[in-house]
Image: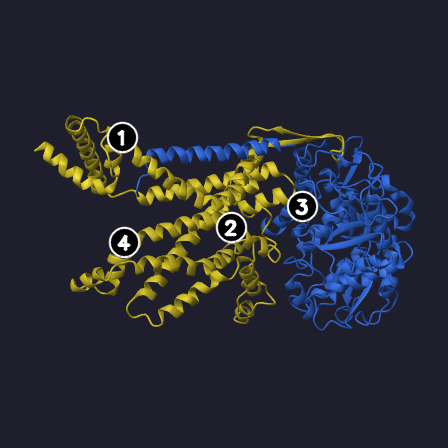
Chain colours: A blue, B yellow
Amino acid sequence: MTPIPSRTVLSRRNLLGLGLGTAAAGLLAGCAVPGSTNVNKAALVPAAAGGETVQITYWAWLKDLQKVCDVWNAKNPRIQVTANWIPGGNAGGYQKMYSALAAGGGPDIGQVEFRQIPEFMLANGLVDLARYGAKDVQSKYDEAAWSQVEFVDGVYGIPQDTGPMGFYYQTAILEQAGGQPPTTWDEWRDLADKVRGTGNGNYLEVFPVADASPFAAYAQQAGARWFRTDGDAWVVDMTDDKTMMVAEFFDGVIDDKLVDTSAGAYSPGWYAAAASGKIAAVTSASWGDALIQSVQGGEGKWKVAPMQTWGGTGYGSSSIGGSTAAVLANAKHPAEALEFITWMTTSKEGVDAMIKYCGIGWSPAKDYIGKARQQPSEWFSGQNYNEEVFVPSAQEQNLEWSWSPVTQSAFTSLQNQFRRKLTGGLKLTDAVELAQREIVQSFKDKGLSVRTAR
Amino acid sequence: MTATQPGSGFRTSTKATSAQKRAPWILLAPFLALFVLTFIIPIISALFQSFTTVDREGLFGEDGVTGRFAGFDNYVTALNDAGFVGSIWRMLLFGIVQVPVMIVLCTILALLLESASARWPAFFRAVYFMPYGVPGVIATILWSFLYVPGLSPIVSLLQSMGLQPDFLGANSVLWSIANIVTWTYTGYNMLIIVAQLKSIPGEVYEAAKMDGAGPFQVAWRIQIPLIAPALVLTTVFSIIGTLQLFAEPQILSTVAPAIDTEYTPNYAAYTNAFAFNEYGVASAQAVIIALAAFILSFAFLALTNRAPKNERDQKKRAKRDGLEARRALQTRGTSATGSRPATGVADRSTTTGAAPRLQADSKGAEA
């Protein structure tokens, strides 16, 4: 080590100090909290003048979305839409949108899942489309889908696809077990027992402890309402009778080893098990059809039945996932963006293109499910399952259900507690209660006022 | 230092070097600009954010959002989070087991490759290093196919032998991750050690052979002591790497239900920042991770850099001698040349080149 002459040490310190000082000054200058300005309190962005060509960008993780935009662009030279692909939601897409918003930029339209809308509102990231006439097009959409985008009298996204649920099953395995597709969850449990009897390692379904979406969907079906608002405060109600009933039911099912808890549906292990007949069925959303078609050698072996219900209580079906096309806060042309989105999600041309190129989930358009979905499917044993199962399913939804601004932490808390069912034998009923405590804390950490219902 | 004229000559020479002193900074500027932009500023920004929080009015903050200084609130939140603290303990356990295993393994590999009887050392060196070329994410995906029952030939083989292995269970998945990490980094660490081994001069081996040392004695008494700096370096890197573990558990969590979003400290910080938008708490966690890595690395360095007792005594003696020498020189210098500034001499006395002459001088002075 050669020591540096003292003069140089000083100048290096000076330089470092200068650098730190500049950096700190820059930070302090830009230290306004991202998302603290509310675009919906500002003046409306006027529609472009007659002769002007408007350029709109749409960030989404749908594949080949540009082809849908091209259909529109060809007919609407005045409004030209460019699609940019981003990673799916939490895999990086949201992070990208959040940082673009924080930097004061971003696209006109972004793909945002229903359950994520309140979280984007919390970041002041969405334009209230009611101010641009979204309520005039409300009648074109499924009621259940629309109920998920309305908050405090505003409309914060336009439904693009939804996920009404059904029961997918392998006909041969159910026959071998001597069972029918279940109409209630009790029948489902009996069927699970019968399938267990057909061989070691054979299960009717999986119950993923690491993904709380199915559990939330089951509770939603039973009639739970985890999040509601009361004045300026949020009310969290996850320990209601309905949720407790669902948690208790699955506690019993897991304790009796009637479900496989090692991994979730559509994971590599699940595909292997489904292909070899070790998994007989999956209760999943309408978009599950495309995923199930990736089960090797499954063609002609699967069918779809209406989702099993909770008997006397709750709703006929439930839903998982689904997304909206939301206009982001820094959009330059909200009015034109809304025009395009309405065409994309409700016109026959738009819906067919979205199904053909992007393979979207269930179309939220009220009276058109898409041409491709009006025909029987070869793969699903020639069954016309879309019209048979999912058209009614989309109507039998829990309209009271609403998401919250802490969806992500809510799911994470639930999942982390559910995992303890496997690692420490914690009961799901207790896990839900523990998760609720963490979720209430997340509300507080966000600076929101909150209380529990009981 | 060449003084052209007595007195003023010293000053001219510093002026001439000031341009030379600027040169490295100009040449370093592109690097420094990027370093400050992508390293220093984000670190300061994280430090700054770790002390802030936000308040919101209304259901979604639509009636106003205000940021404020939060003191150590975020740190309290982070340290009160049992999951986060648990993840730090988990990583300590991981490090205590995985780092020694890997260091021993890579040392053995390096010694084997550098031993006289090694066949095709270049080929095997490349083979052992190859896993490091596979990105961590890809490596984890590859390994996950060897862990998942129903896909893995290893699991099928063990099952056919009557065993029921569960590589992804609550108690085993940590070691499945350790296996991936060891597989990836052993070759890399081996290369560092090989480089150090190659720098050992041949005469040392010759001398050892003349003294009748066998291959094991050469390894134990010659090579291992001489590669100690490389071992320390790889261990410190591994300790830091352990605390930063992220990609492997994150990818494996899709097939292993036992991995939650707070499985490792970095995963917890990531979840807070990008899933919850809780940048304050996430920054506090990141700072805590950095501090922990800092403390652990320095504790390890302090432990290994402690010289043996006789050497420490020697150093103390040398320091005392040096001081005496400088004092002696100063008194002699001022009396002899008068105008010569003492600082210049002090400067020179610290450079290694001047030391032997000074020592000789001091001896002369004492005599």
Give the distance between the C-alpha atoms of the residues marked 2 and 4, in whole angstroms: 30 Å
Above or below, B213 relative to A52: below
Callout 2–callout 3 Cβ contact below 8 Å: no
Residue at horizontal 78 percent and vertical 30 percent from the top = A232
Say which element carries label 4. Answer: helix
Which residue is identified by label 2? Answer: B245
Q: Nearer the viewer, mark 2 or mark 1?
A: 1
Residue under the image location 75 percent in, 41 percent down: A329
The amino acid type found where label 4 is placed reads Pro
Along the line of sight, which residue is nearer the eye, A435 or A323? A323
Q: Is any part of residue A180 visible from this angle?
A: no
Residue B8 circle label: 1
Label 4 crowd (10 A; few <14 / some 14-19 / many >=20): few
Marks 3/4: CA–CA distance: 52 Å
What subunit carries mark 3? A
Q: Residue furthest front?
A: B5
| Chain label for disc 4 | B
Residue where numbered disc 3 is placed? A414
